[in-house]
Image (cartoon, rainbow, N blue to C red):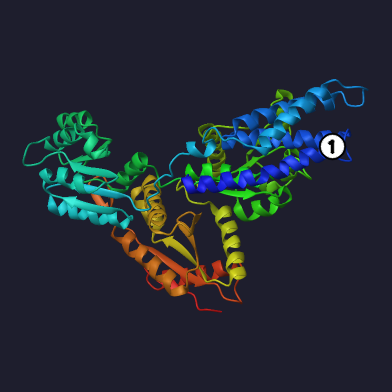
Amino acid sequence: MSDDHLDTLVSAFESELPRYLSELQEAWQGPRRGTRDAMVKIQEIAHKLSGSAGAYGYLGLAEAAVGVAATAAEVLSHFGQGHNPIQQRLFGQLNALGAHLAMPVRVEAGLGSLARPARDRRQVRHVVLVDDDVAYARLLQAEMRHFGFEVDTLTDLTALTHYLDQHQPDLIVMDVSFPEGQVAGPKAVQSIRAHAHAHGHVPVIFISARDTIGSRLAAVRAGGEAFFVKPFDVAELMDAIDRILGGGEQAAYRILVVDDAASLARLYASTLEQAGMIAQVVSNPLEVLEAMESFHPDLLLMDIYMPEISGVELARIIQQHRSYLGVPIVFLSAERDPLKQLEALGQGGDNFLTKPIEAAELVKAVSIRANHYQTLRSLMLKDSLTGLLNHSRVLEQLDHELRRAARLNQPLSVAMIDIDHFKSINDTWGHPVGDSVILTLARLLRERLRVSDVVGRYGGEEFMVVMPEAGLEDARRVIDSLRESFARISHRVGDKDFTVSFSAGVAQITPQCVDRSLMEKADQALYQAKHSGRNRVCIAPLC
């Protein structure tokens, strides 16, 4: 978090302190003095201050607030039982708390200074291919580019060190043999890694025309992540790269921060954002359901003590909605009573964190719960073979994008894609090869389409692509480019190679076509493409 941004949040927090002081004085000395409501108000204010003050580094204020909150709880537990000597202790603690509120002293940077740097999220993966077989290198470069990779080629092994001085590739694909020797490639990698401080650790996949134990041993000793014997199916190479680099960047966790202390909520949100998450703040707890509808959080970070409705009550309301079942709720409160924490967890909470909290602990706790939710949700919503959205989920997303496009008066196009002659592929090469072809197309769609595009496996060898803010001609051009790339990809079975094509139909939303009939129009255009010779893209007429 930048110093300027943190200073802004600190200033906002300090501006709230006179209000807290005024409310405490009103509760202790005002017309409601001595009532249960006044004592509850004192406890509520102390709870908020004990968490937020510590987060901002006002440790004296936080400590004083913890004492007031604990003593107020004691007073309430004996309320109505006659003279209560505990109130005299509370009076002294309130005076100390008032002094801290009147002259707050910040002794450390607090939560904001511990935030992690934002993660680099590159969209295009950069690979350098090192191979003195120029023809093979060009072929492999072309096929990898079909999948959206940025690929540079080097045919001279000695040029690699200079290349790494100038570039930072995500991965190296390197031949084992060069004119310098039969295992010159692995030796060069070992030499480069001996100077890791200069080039960092870049993962390496070795390739070779010679499948010998010596070649494989040299690759292992050089730290190679995988080994492929030429010629190989590029889809297998893509699988290895996905395994090494990860199958695309995981979606950033979406965190909804619910706390009526606005400045503190913003501080938590900023801390999570610095860790690479997307955070949204809701200061009015009665607006949470609206925020969930539009934001689709992976986790709620929620205070327990809030006006009008408690965090526990709000959690129970959220769980009444079927679509929000399973969304984890992490309570973040100054409440230190273990029994009350367990009671909150029993009412719908997934974790309980105590204010004030260190940035690293907050980020870790939120990340673990959000990751668990994303993983389970992915298993429910995604096709088991391709990892794309499954049939029912892609239709739900189509409905959502149709409503959004109609509301914002924006264009939207839908494409239906079907692999040509797929039955003959299964009959000729077998179902495992057919699955490999489906996976190759799924990977191509995932790598080449925009993040905002919705891609799903509609069924069998058929796919649906929903393209928000894309007109008919733009959508046709994108899908046709994918068609051309897919038709050039070589699939290898044993010592034989074959290529596959697909056909597609594209339709665009119109005022008369704003529902699932748009998908039907795209399907009709697909039928036209099939019956016009296949390996082409047809567009549906505007209605």
Q: Is residue 239 left or right of residue 175?
A: right
| Residue at position x 18%, y 47% in the image | 163
Q: In this picture, is 489 found above or below 247?
A: below
| Residue at position x 55%, y 40% in the image | 370
Residue 101, picture quadrant: top right
Q: Position of residue 414 (x, y in %)?
A: 50, 66
Q: Report if residue 498 is visible in the image.
A: no
Q: Position of residue 271 (x, y in %)?
A: 52, 42
Q: Report if residue 521 is visible in the image.
A: yes
Tell which of 392 and 409 is nearer to you: 409
Tell which of 107 and 369 is nearer to you: 107
- Name the amino acid, label 1: Gln
Q: Is residue 20 left or right of residue 8?
A: right
Looking at the rendered structure, the secondary structure element under dot 1 is helix
Determine crowd level at label 1: few under 14, some 14-19, many 20+ residues with C-alpha closer than 10 A: few
Q: Total marks drawn? A: 1
In this view, the residue farthest toward the top is 85
Q: In this picture, is 72 found above or below 456?
A: above
Q: Is residue 28 left or right of residue 141?
A: right
| Residue at position x 47%, y 58% in the image | 463
Residue that numbered label 1 is attached to: 29
| Residue at position x 19%, y 42% in the image | 174
